[in-house]
Image: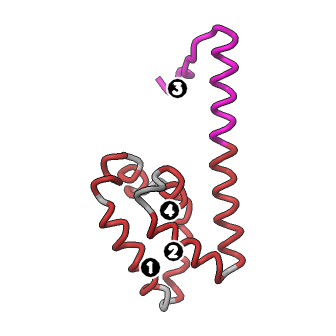
Amino acid sequence: MVSCTSSIADRPAFVSQSKGIIDYISHEFYRLEEDSSWLQEFEYYLPQLCHLVIAYPRDTKALSQYLMDLCSRSVLYSFAVLRLMLLFVLFTLLIFRFILRCESDGSSLRLPLRFQ
């Protein structure tokens, strides 16, 4: 299930114009930590938050600081964040390698029929 947060936050204009909102939300995370049921909901959004930190590092300093604080307090969260970051990097490298191979073969990149 894709949430609205993912589709909106993937746009660079949203992040650059909403830096204050991301900072505010990051600071609210500290306050919400007192409620233990909130952490289960937070786990659902962890991949999207990690994506924001990687894709827009200059605009998400408060969010990356919160994730670092969370990882320093919890081994489970630190492994979850590490796994997500490694998967993002691996996926990016695989796509880059595929593009280079297609360019070296002289073939053009063509999307499968279901994506056109």
Magenta segment range? 91-116
Q: Tell which residue pokes out farthest to the bottom in this image.
A: 34
The relative height of residue 35 versus residue 66 in the rendered view (above or below) is below
Q: CA distance from mark 2 to mark 4?
A: 10 Å
* Residue occupying the point 57% across, 22% down: 112
Mark 2 surroundings within 10 Å by alpha-carbon count, few (fewer than 14), some (14 through 19), many (20 or more): some
Q: Are marks 1 and 2 in contact (CB under 8 Å)?
A: yes
Q: Are marks 3 and 4 in contact (CB under 8 Å)?
A: no
Residue of label 1: 29
Please report whichever mark, 4 or 1, sits nearer to the chain's N-terminal start.
1
Badge 4 marks a residue whose secondary structure is: helix
Residue of label 2: 66
Magenta: main secondary structure equals helix
* Residue occupying the point 63% across, 15% down: 103
User: On the picture, is 96 further left or further right than 8?
Assistant: right
Residue of label 4: 49
Q: Position of residue 33 (x, y in %)?
A: 49, 86
Of the residues shown, which amino acid type is indicated by label 4? Leu
Residue 56 among those drawn in magenta: no
Q: CA distance from mark 1 to mark 2?
A: 8 Å
